[in-house]
Image (spheres, rainbow, N blue to C red):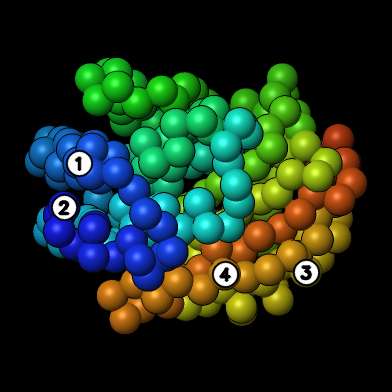
Amino acid sequence: MYETLREGLPGLGLSLEEETCRRLCRFGQAVVEQNKVMNLTAITQPDQVAKLHLLDSLSVLKAADLRGKTLIDVGCGAGFPGVPVAIACPEAKVTLLDSLAKRMAWLEPTLAELGVDARCLTARAEEAVADRRERFDYAASRAVARLNILLELTAPYVKVGGAVLALKGAAAAEELKEARGAISRLGLKAEEVLDFPVDGAAHSVIVLRKVSPTPEKYPRRYAKIKQAPL
């Protein structure tokens, strides 16, 4: 895992200290171990964890300068991309949000053991925003939903001037086109799509700038969002 991670960093234009890489791999290994008793990931081969979890998550650092900034990882799952970001950029203030209490009950003490400074929050995205509206510089998310659904869950958290960072695969361009209505209604503007091939597969970070406040009526209840995407 360590060797694969080190080999992949230049492709992202990143350079990390040896100890940082080892901490990233310790987290990756912790996910693999916990996956034996809890469904966290289908990716368990060490080299694939490095490529498809760690390096993929670190692409966020090429999309935004997070030093001294606040970031919320919406639907963090096993901790991607938020935990690798917190490890590689300790100057960022990272909040990990997920609705599955069992998963977060594992993640919080695991981060404490690894010395990772990130806050864990157990709640549904459309509900937790009530007292966190437009409080973050950035909202990131990976493998949660198609972009036209995801943006309604993430944009309300972001301050005007900040951005949503959506990690996507080969369908990034298609999803961006599909989400045009959501982008305009939620106060966003598509800024750029950064492509990072990982192990021969297309990986992208879609950067959507927050140009105006998101209307108070968003987000709607998740069932409504899914039934009638913007």
Measure the C-alpha gap from mark 2 to mark 3.
40 Å
Question: In this view of the protein, which residue sits in the foreground, 111 or 183?
Answer: 111
What is the spatial separation of the Cα atoms under label 4 and label 2, in whole angstroms?
A: 25 Å
At a point 47% along the width and 22% down the height, the residue shown is 119
In which quadrant of the rendered view does residue 177 lie?
bottom right
Where is the N terminus found, in terms of image quarters?
bottom left
- Residue underneath mark 1: 22
Query: Upstream in the sequence, badge 1 or badge 3?
Result: 1
**Badge number at residue 2:** 2
Q: Amino acid at mark 3?
A: Arg
- Whether residues under marks 2 and 1 lie with C-beta atoms below 8 angstroms apart, the answer is yes
Please report contact status of discs 4 and 2: CB closer than 8 Å, yes or no: no
Where's residue 27, x and y in %?
Answer: 23, 38
Looking at marks 4 and 1 on the same chain, the residue that comes earlier in the sequence is marked by 1
Q: Secondary structure at mark 1?
A: helix
Q: Secondary structure at mark 4?
A: strand
Q: Is residue 86 above or below residue 193?
A: above
Where does the image place residue 87, in percent across and percent down from the top left?
37, 36
